[in-house]
Amino acid sequence: MTYNEVSFDLPHIQLKGLRGGTPGKPLLLLLHGWLDNCHSFLPLLSEPELADYDWIALDFAGHGHSSHRGADAAYYFVDYMYDVQALIEQQGWQHLHVVGHSMGGYVGQLLGACFGERIASLVTIEAFGLVTGEPEQTLQLLRDGYTSRQKQFGRELPTYKDLNHLIQARAKAGDFPPELAELLLRRNLTHTEAGFCWRTDPRVRTTSPFRFTQQHVPSVLQALQMPVQVVLGEDGHAQLPDALAQWGAHVQQLSVVQVAGGHHAHMQSPRSVAQAIRAHLDTSNMHD
C-alpha cells in the first residue's frame, strides 16, 4: 500500500491526513476516534477490498498533524462536523462515502443528517446514536466544562524519555496489542532533544460543557437518507447494542455487522471489517 501526506488549508484551520488508493475512483473519507489519528485506519486500508477506492484518512483538528484551534477556541464536538463540511465544500466533493470510528462515527452521523445530499453512504465503527446527557445535568456540565478549560491555560506539555512506557500505557488504555498502540503514537508524538512530547492539543481532553439529550437523537437519525452500516466489536463498548435497540428503527437503511475485537475492531480485525465495508459499499453503489 502506498499513500501520501495531504494538507488542506481551510479559512479557519489546516487539516492534514493521508491519501491513497486509486485516483479517479469513488472517494472514501475516513474519520478517526477521539485521541487517535488517521493512522488508526492503516491496517484497514492495507486490505485489498478497499484498494479500488480513492481514500483520504483525515486528522481531526488538534489531533495527529492537523492544526490546533486558536487560543480563544475550544473543542466542541459539533465543530469537528463543521470542519469536515467546510473541507467537503472547499474541495467540491460529491457522492462520497464516509467511514467513521467512535467520535468520527458520531461526526459522520451529524454530517450525514445535516448535509446528506453529498454523502452516498455511511459506515460507523463502534458508534451509533449520540453520546447523551440528561437535562438535569446541564448546570453541572457547564461548571465542569469551565473548570477543565481553566486548568489548561498556561499548562506546559510534559516530555517523556521512555517511548516504550508510552506504548504500553496506550495499549492498556485501548485494550489492544502494543504494535497497534505504536502505530497510533507514531503520529501523535513528536521527538525533540528533551524527549517525546504530544502533538495532540491537550485541550482536546477538556470536559464538554453540554451534551445532546436522548430526545434529540431520533430527529438526527431520521434525517439519514443514505445506507448506513454499523460495525461493532464483539468486545466493544457495551452501550452500543442498547443504543441500536433503542434507536435503530429511526434509520431507514440500516445494517449491523459484528466482528472480533474491541472498540478498535477496525485495527484488530481489519480483514473482517474491510470485507463488511466493501459489501456495504457495493450494495450502496447498486442503489445509486
Image (spheres, helix red, strand yellow):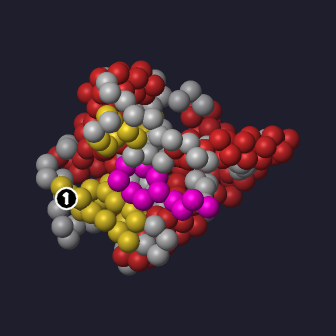
As drawn, 106 above or below 9: above
Q: Quadrant of residue 93?
A: bottom left
Disc 1 target residue: 4
Examine the residues drawn in magenta and state their main secondary structure.
loop
Q: Is residue 161 above or below residue 215?
A: above
Quarter of the view holding residue 284 = bottom left
Near mark 1 (Cα within 10 A), the count class, few <14, some 14-19 or many ≥20, is few
Q: In the image, residue 234 lies at what x, y percent?
A: 44, 25
Residue 71 inside the magenta-drawn segment: yes
Q: Nearer the viewer, residue 133 or 208?
A: 208
Can you give x and y, in whole percent of width and height, for residue 247 in the image? 64, 44
Q: Residue at x 52, y 54 (%)?
A: 107
**Residue 254 location in percent, x, y?**
50, 49
Rendered residue at 18%/55% (across/down) = 3
What residue is shown at x 58% (from left), y 67% (from top)?
Answer: 114
Number of on-image labels: 1
Q: Residue at x 24, y 59 (%)?
A: 5
The residue closer to the viewer here, 154 or 10, is 154
Q: Residue furthest front?
A: 193
Quadrant position of residue 163: top left
Describe residue 213's horizontal placement relative to residue 3 as left or right.
right
Does the magenta portion include 65?
yes
Question: Can you see residue 95?
Answer: no
Please provide percent x and percent y for residue 28: 32, 59
Instruction: Name which residue type carries label 1.
Output: Asn
Q: Is residue 11 above or below residue 269?
A: below
Range shown magenta: 62-72
Question: Which of the pair 17/157 is nearer the observer?
Answer: 157
Q: Label 1, secondary structure: give it.
A: strand
Residue 144, can we see it?
yes
Q: Is residue 155 left or right of residue 32?
A: right
- The quadrant in which the C terminus is found is bottom left
